[in-house]
Amino acid sequence: MAEPALRVTAIGIGYLGLTHAVCMADLGHQVLAIDVDQDKVAKAAQGEVPFFEPGLEALLRKNLDAGRLRLTSSFAEVGAFGAVHFLCVGTPQAPDGRADLSYLHAAADALAPHLAAPCLVAGKSTVPVGTARAVAQRIRAAAPAGAAAELAWNPEFLREGHAVADTLRPDRLVFGVSSARAEALLRQVYAEPLAAGVASLTMDLETAELVKVAANAFLATKISFINAMADACAAAGADVARLAEALGYDERIGRRFLAPGLGFGGGCLPKDIRAFRATALELGVPSVAGLLGEVDAINESRRALVAAMAREEAGGSLAGKRVAVLGAAFKPNSDDIRDSPSLDVCARLTRQGAVVTVHDPAALAKAAQAQPQLRYASSVTEAASGAELVLHLTDWPDYQALDPGALAAVVARPVLIDARCSLDAALWHAAGWSVRVPGRPGLG
Ligand SMILES: NC(=O)c1ccc[n+]([C@@H]2O[C@H](COP(=O)([O-])OP(=O)(O)OC[C@H]3O[C@@H](n4cnc5c(N)ncnc54)[C@H](O)[C@@H]3O)[C@@H](O)[C@H]2O)c1
């Protein structure tokens, strides 16, 4: 590392915070991480990652062993330790759709009284525009260092499933700052990726906060756009998979995030667009509020559409029908089930009397805890045995490698709904399956 190592802290060690703490240590910094969840602190200190994230556990152990990363439960220790403190706590959705900032405020309030020396507090959580300035005031008022405890916003763009690579080599770094000193400190933190050519953009606090929510709003809009096109295809007897493929060749549009199907879920996109919509209404920006309301409504409608398709394929009633579901996580390569479209569909089917058995390569334990009324199977064959309907709801690469012929032999009826529009429909059809895909003509 060209620049000297810094003393860095991570406050909150969930998906974002633990990844950030580990990667900062791996960049050579001395890192101290804290969480109010003592179980998470104890597990991380033992080298255990309490969620599925490829590559993270090995890197955690490496940096614990190297003595660059430590865990604590003491805010006094954190406050005294860090030159840069990263706020990584959750900002979940409140019942009214806004962001619940109580964790962020609690973290700032716990940290501030221990900031006696000049330092930088850098927010990484996703927040409504205006939050950073309010948190800055809160910290300045309570910190013994006063204005020398400065605030910056450095939003995070990592994707679960690719979190390590995204943190070590992000597409870009966004520095929302109020001073040259704050920018210099962030440049020192990220000296290694910057030297490797990662782009950085320095801006005011408000623009940095908005960059993050605007990025998520755009991605969500792209997904809902192609799903609206799936509705048009269904009405016109056209094929949304071919449409998306053809659109994707246009480099102004691009192929990514143009996958039709069950739509988005997880701990970020849904709550972030709802929070942004609420902010837009408060700020008097009807264009953003209207757009995001429609994006959200199109996305939500996918779940009802797939459940209705299942009922139709079951002959009009799901009562007592055995349904196998492939995938429980909100997306592949993750065990995150927050606002999982798959589990939402499962709940809809169960309410109609279906007997649902779910398979997932990584998320079974979390799913079983959240939805104990469902049955769970540790293999696809076990889930599919005796099923009258198979639903593909999370796009794990494992499911691309399934043998449709072998599965046809264990189900009661070979009927597949590929709600992720990603399995090889012709291959499944050739193996004897009737295949339904939202927005595509049916096969068989
Ligand atoms: N998960 C992602 O892919 C991702 C990507 C980019 C941005 N973000 C944003 O990052 C933030 C965190 O998301 P996450 O997915 O890591 O959430 P998470 O729920 O996995 O983790 C949040 C952690 O904060 C801890 N916490 C709560 N209050 C605390 C306090 N007062 N002091 C210390 N720790 C506290 C919780 O115990 C928890 O471990 C959110 O704003 C989210 O929108 C997440």
Image: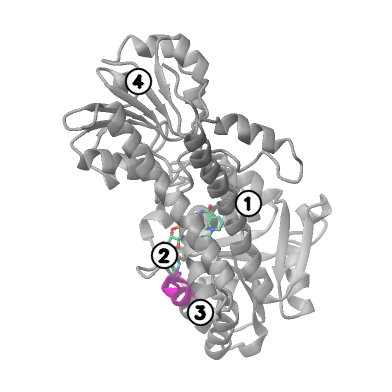
Mark yes or no: residue 92 visible. yes
| Residue 337 versus residue 69 in the image, above or below | above
Q: Amino acid at mark 3?
A: Glu
> Mark 4 = which residue?
415
In this rendering, would 72 be left or right of 175? left
Q: Which residues are magenta?
A: 99-107
Q: Earlier in the sequence, mark 1 or mark 3?
A: 1
Q: Is mark 1 within 8 Å of ligand 1?
A: no
| Disc 1/disc 4 C-alpha distance (Å) | 45 Å
| Disc 4/disc 3 C-alpha distance (Å) | 48 Å
Q: Earlier in the sequence, mark 1 or mark 2?
A: 1
Question: Magenta residues: mostly which secondary structure?
Answer: helix
Q: Earlier in the sequence, mark 4 or mark 3?
A: 3
Identify the secondary structure beneath mark 2: loop
> Mark 2 = which residue?
93
Q: Earlier in the sequence, mark 1 or mark 4?
A: 1
Quarter of the C terminus within the rendering: top left
Identify the secondary structure beneath mark 3: helix
> Mark 1 = which residue?
23
Identify the secondary structure beneath mark 4: strand
Q: Earlier in the sequence, mark 3 or mark 2?
A: 2
* Circle 4 crowding by C-alpha within 10 Å: few under 14, some 14–19, many from 20: many
* 23 or 301: nearer the viewer: 301
- Disc sitting over residue 282 in the figure: 3
